[in-house]
Amino acid sequence: MTHATYARRQAARSWWRDGLEGSIYLLCAIGIAFAIADGALLATSALDGIYAAGRLTGIVAAILVLVQMTLISRAPFVERAFGHDRVAAVHTRLGKPVVILMLVHAGIITVVSAQYDGHSVLSQSAAFWELGWFMIAAQAALGIFLVIAATSLVAVRRRWRYERWHAVHLLVYVGVAAAVPHQFLEGSTFRDAGAAWWFWLVLYVLALGSFLLWRIVVPAIRTSAHGLRVASVEPLADGSTSIVLAGRGLDRLRARPGQFMLWRFLDRERWTEAHPYSLSRAPEADTLRLTVKPSGDHSRGLAALRPGTRVVAEGPLGVFTEDSAHAPGAVLVAAGIGITPMRALLEGDDAPAALIYRVRSRSEAPLLDEVAALAAERGVALHVVEGPRASTGWGTAAGETLASLVTDVADRDVYVCGPPAWTARVRDDARAAGVPRHAIHEERFGW
């Protein structure tokens, strides 16, 4: 593949990504325009102006909630443009503004309505209930979003297991369902069945439809079509476990080396949970493989999986593939179990120039024998950086750098996979070595 081909591919992806990001602002502008056309800014007093501001904040909050739902729907047109990591980051980043806008919307509407009617704020909150069940549901929705926002704070997430946090986070769908009716039944912008009503209906159908299609319908169809089951469970010497999954026509999934999937193992202990694990070798027509290291309750229990267990797989997800490269001959940098997507990338169409594997010791290095054999077969320079963690940098006390191991690293794409803090150190080293920001691709193991 020529450099011009790489450039055209990345340019097309960039245009698509920028277009999707721009559509968020466009939708907000259209929603506000409909409200203005409905007379939102025809204020005759200061209170009217404040009330209009409350309406507009509610409109923007509703659009951003639908954007969040679309982002986490795992729709291919979103995943291929941004990659799952970036989608999750944007989804998280939007969470705080959404809750703030909801609070501002509810606060302004309640306070100003209380002024209009001569009620106290508490009395006005209760008075909304007289309008119908949909206002009670809207207040419940606000409470749900506040709970979700509180449990999404970094200080809380660090103290909670992923499984508990994820279970609470599922309430967001209940919150959205509870908030929708009051928009159409009480909001003046929506209830006239005009263009604004259809605008919002289409938004909700697309967002909820995308979620239902890609999170529920497609996985169910694929489960039936491919018959994916656990074929074998192999404990490895370093303590990790390789799980081979067998099925029919798995090449139709179009999984690429470097991607991951969300795996749900349908046994008694694990059927309620779906967890992300990377493919640890290039996908084949009838088998897939993942390799996990025990780091939590779910990954620790996978060693006890029984062959024959049925599996639901969502994906493939992520853009941590050679399709993201800007030139041939990438440099792969992995730490610990972060080697799994790198092991698969070694079998890609475009062989990397070098692989740097950071481990505490060779006895604790997952898949090292396979990686060494593949690197030798494909002519890839393998650097195993072994030893205790240094106080600075990403290597050992010897102070290894990307530039010292790969002299022309500045001219190459750099793929990095490992714990978040370590990945950040590698990224900083790559930037210091002259690697452009757009040529650094990260896959972080964490939540």
Image (cartoon, helix red, strand yellow):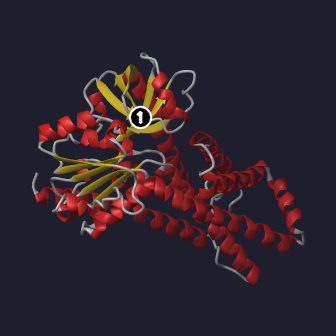
Q: Is residue 111 visible?
A: yes
- Where residue 189 appears, as percent x and y from the top left, is 63, 63
Relative side of 155 to 402, left or right: right
Q: Classify residue 80 as left or right of residue 119.
A: left
Q: Name the residue under label 1.
A: 292
* Residue 11 in view in this figure: no
Q: Residue at x 47, y 33 (%)?
A: 217
Where is residue 178 drawn, in percent x and y?
Answer: 68, 48
Q: Percent from the top left, x then y, of residue 294?
A: 47, 35
Q: Position of residue 205 (x, y in %)?
A: 52, 47
Question: Please, is residue 324 above or below residue 210 in the view?
Answer: below
- Residue at left offset 16%, top offset 62%: 407
SS category of the residue bearing label 1:
strand
Nearer to us in this view, 440 or 295? 295
Identify the residue shown where x is 19% and y is 50%.
354
Determine the residue positioned at 55% across, 65% down.
Answer: 31
How many numbered badges does the structure rendering display?
1
Mark 1 nearby-residue class (10 Å; few <14, some 14–19, many ≥20): many
- Nearest to the observer: residue 240 or residue 46: 240
Please tell me in which quadrant of the rendered image residue 307 appears.
top left
Is residue 86 rendered to the left or right of residue 56?
A: left
Label 1 amino acid?
Val
Q: Which residue lies furthest to the left in this view?
A: 2
